[in-house]
Image (cartoon, helix red, strand yellow):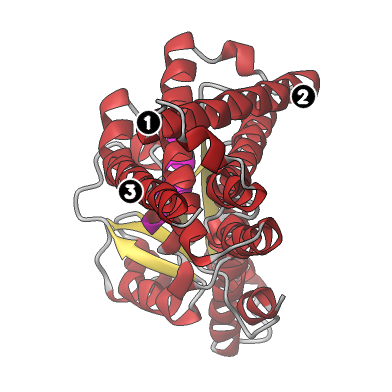
Amino acid sequence: MFLINFIFAPREQFISFKVGVIDEDEGFLSRTIINVMNETGVLNPVVIKDGGDLRELLRRGEYPLIIVIPRGFSDNITLATQAQIEVYYLEGSRDSLVALRVFEGFVAGFKDNVSNIAASVFVNSVPEPFRGIVSGYIMFIANPLTLKPHVIETEIPAVKAFKISLVTSIIGISLLFTGILSGLYTVVEKRYEGYVQTLLSSPTRAHEFLLSEVLAVLVGALISVTAIVAGGLMLGAPLHEIPLYKLFTSLVLLFVSTLGLIGLGMVLAVFTKTPQSAGALGNAIAFPIMFLGGLAIPKWMLPSWLQVLPDLLPHPRLVHSITYYILGGWSLEETLVHSLPAITLSLTLLLLGALAYRRVLERIYESP
């Protein structure tokens, strides 16, 4: 609770978004807007020199929002002509929609400032013959800047996509606790109950013990995933519309991630003796990861200095890869490239866990 309070307690500002900006104008005012956005601490602009396909940038999850400042923007504002900014966001994405609302508020503040400056230099009354001439300037004072949003549609409608993302998050949370706690109990509970000594007198080898335990956890995880998927289908998540090859790839990545979590639990088991302390230790590790890994809450709700964690932690990285693969339009190659560091780390954790498991068995044999 101390950690949650430290991270999420109210502050002046801790929500931030990395938004893409294409500055086609490259004028004084366009650069000013980018600088002011950066000073807010909420909208962190990243200038994109080579725009490429904006839709693909959004679908791949690189930015929740892409802002385009068109040519002539600075001139229009300077010459008291209504200017426009274009903004692209992803349909059905929580991050995109929240970032859009934040940017709309930013633009509204900018418009108010421009209106006040324009009104301060405008005369209170205009003679009748000149009203037609200054009508454009009057319109500029009333609304100097318009925002033109462009929604980028996904293959799956927004509401259904949101439900699918919730299902993937719940699966990620379920496997997080299942993997770590199972790895812990695999070592601690059996050592504590004392019947491993009896099995050691049989011809069964250490790797056969390990294989049986890991398979048992994976079967349990598969049952949990099936139950969550069934619940998602009943609540309207169109999981049946996802191609089978994407479902199969996602399941394989989930199993690899679970193997890493089992290995992590086995490594942690070296530092605890009883099932009670193992449960406390497992929850102490899994519970913060659930929040800091962007599984229980969106990544953008984390403080900016913690938003790197979901990409560093292997399990959250794989869960997010699956979400982008299913909803974001990532290709299989892009998904595997993004997942490769997490896959490598997960398999390394499993190897370390296997060594720790073997060492525990050896110690039981030495001191039954």
Residue 153, position in %: x, y? 52, 29
Residue 91, position in %: x, y? 57, 36
Neighbour tally class for label 2: few under 14, some 14-19, many 20 plus, Cα within 10 Å: few
Query: Residue 67 in magenta?
Result: no
Mark 3 or mark 2, whichever is nearer to me? 3
Q: Which residues are magenta?
A: 312-324
Q: What residue is pinned by disc 3?
A: 355
Q: Residue at x 37, y 58 (%)?
A: 312
**Mark pair 2, 1: CA separation:** 40 Å
Mark 2 or mark 1, whichever is nearer to me? 1
Q: Is residue 347 shown to the viewer in this render? A: yes
Task: Answer with left or right where residue 237 lies relative to residue 62.
Answer: right
Q: Identify the mark nearer the N-term, 2 or 1.
A: 1
Rendered position, 154 above or below 184: above
Residue 123, position in %: x, y? 61, 87
Q: Which quadrant holds residue 233?
A: top right
Task: Give yes or no for contact between labels 2 and 1 (Cβ–Cβ under 8 Å).
Answer: no
Q: What residue is pinned by disc 2?
A: 231
Mark number displayed over residue 205:
1
